[in-house]
Amino acid sequence: MPVLYAGQKNGAITEYDLTLQSGRTAFFDNQFTPTIGINQSYLGPTLDMVNGADVRMSVTNTLEEDATLHWHGFHVPARYDGTPHQRIAPGETWTAQFQVRQKPSLFWYHSHAHRRAGPQVYHGLAGPIIVRDDEGRTDSLPHEYGIDDVPLIVQDRAFGSDGRLIYARSMHDIMMGMRGDTLLVNGVIDPAFECQTELLRLRLLNGSNARIYDFEFETQQSFLMTGSDGGHLEAPVRMSRIRLSPGERAEIVVDASHGVPLQLLARSLSGEMGMMDGGMMGGRWGRGNSRRSSEGSVFKVLLIVPNEQLRPSTATPAKLTTLPAIDPSKAVKTRRFVLEMGMGMGMRGRGGFTINGKSMDMARIDERVKLDTTEIWEVENASMMAHPFHVHDVQFRILDRNGRPPPEHEMGLKDTVLLSSRERVRLLLSFKDYADSDTPYMYHCHILEHEDAGMMGQFVIEA
Ligand SMILES: [Cu+2]
């Protein structure tokens, strides 16, 4: 379980000291893997934050390369967003100060270094953030951290026989995004969890570089999805499978009152045409915990083992929150974004990974948005594989997918949305509070190899 870190109170400010550091991590018996992490050797602590709090993040980079930390899903001034523009050189400390303005949910922080987000996150520069409401509660759902409220950072990795992480060595790894055959959950292979309560809340984060997963229980037991990226759904949605692409989160409540062990699985989609991975091997588990079959790659995520005596849990409320109506008539402007992967395999400029035909250029502002306006962003995936589209600064709503309303579980607050090949999604976004005509926010594909290769653009908000 990641350590919970609530920061230090300094007057009215809560301070978090985060050190980016290299180290060695024992993922396997008698083998150490060179990794990087935040305040530890791999990944970082769970930042415990209260909505409305003024926080100061001090990030010290002890690595031998430039790095950044981005607060994924957070609404903060652009200069504190932790994008490539807030580069932290080796030996330097970067300070970001802002007010937490989020609904209670799971967020995360991770490297957004220029062209290096992929390798840095892969080696460990990421961690979860749990935001609680103004009164310091999470909500009426299970909320005892590590007991009945458990974050799961799900990441696939490839290891060499020497225990070292293998990162993107081929053009295929860049094209498809880096994929491994071993699943780490909170930095652990094949974790088991002793469940002490009837209901268990799992906060799922797909923190992988590229893989898209369908999460489900081996027994097909259903669960209640209670929250999406940026907050609660209006009402719980009963599901037996939830798909998450890199960057996306889902909160689910699982009933363990029957006392039978539950194995959570992640089925991996290949990303090509939204189909499953084609598998060559038989149905056996690999070195880590992946199994390939004709149905695709399947990973073990978490084995939940209920205690003999389970503490009673409060029933999940039928209504969780009230969200503003999704009203496209408020939009003053529609912008179009077309995601493309050129066939020329070029890594820079045209022919590579582009949005609206352009590869990321830090010196170019692609879109200028007016403060205090609402817009529709129409995003189209013109490529042959699926891409998760992430927008900084805002929690948006999905208006429609290919002209049809989104499913119930996608009607809540989102900052990342998956687009299958040829899919067209319309988003409703409101830009509030922070204007800065010089410092941009990003929008990009959250397959980190695609982001690094240029499938990213920049927008500023002007007063
Ligand atoms: Cu992509």
Image (cartoon, rainbow, N blue to C red):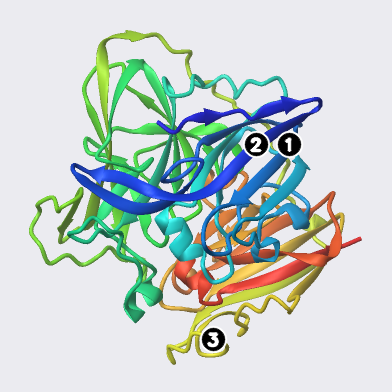
Can the viewer see residue 72? Answer: no
Horizontally, is 21 left or right of 232 in the view?
Answer: left
At label 2, which amino acid type do we have?
Answer: Tyr
Q: Which mark is residue 340?
A: none
Is ligand 1 less than 8 Å from the beta carbon at label 3? no
Residues under numbered marks 2 and 1 in contact, where contact means CB atoms less than 8 Å apart? yes
Looking at the picture, tell me which residue is in the foreground, 12 or 340: 12
Give above or below for 333 relative to 13.
below
Whether residue 153 can be seen here: yes
**In the image, residue 78 lies at what x, y percent?**
76, 57
Amino acid type at mark 3 = Arg
Q: Which mark is residue 55?
A: 1
Which residue position is annotated with label 3?
Answer: 348
Label 3: element kind? loop
Closer to the chain start, of discs 1 and 3, is: 1
For the residues carrying marks 3 and 2, which lies nearer the camera in this image? 2
Tell me which numbered mark, 3 or 2, is placed earlier along the sequence. Answer: 2
- Crowd rating for badge 3 (residues with CA inside 10 Å; few <14, some 14–19, many 20+): some
Amino acid on which disc 1 is placed: Val
Alpha carbons under labels 2 and 1: distance apart: 7 Å
Q: Quadrant of the C terminus?
A: bottom right
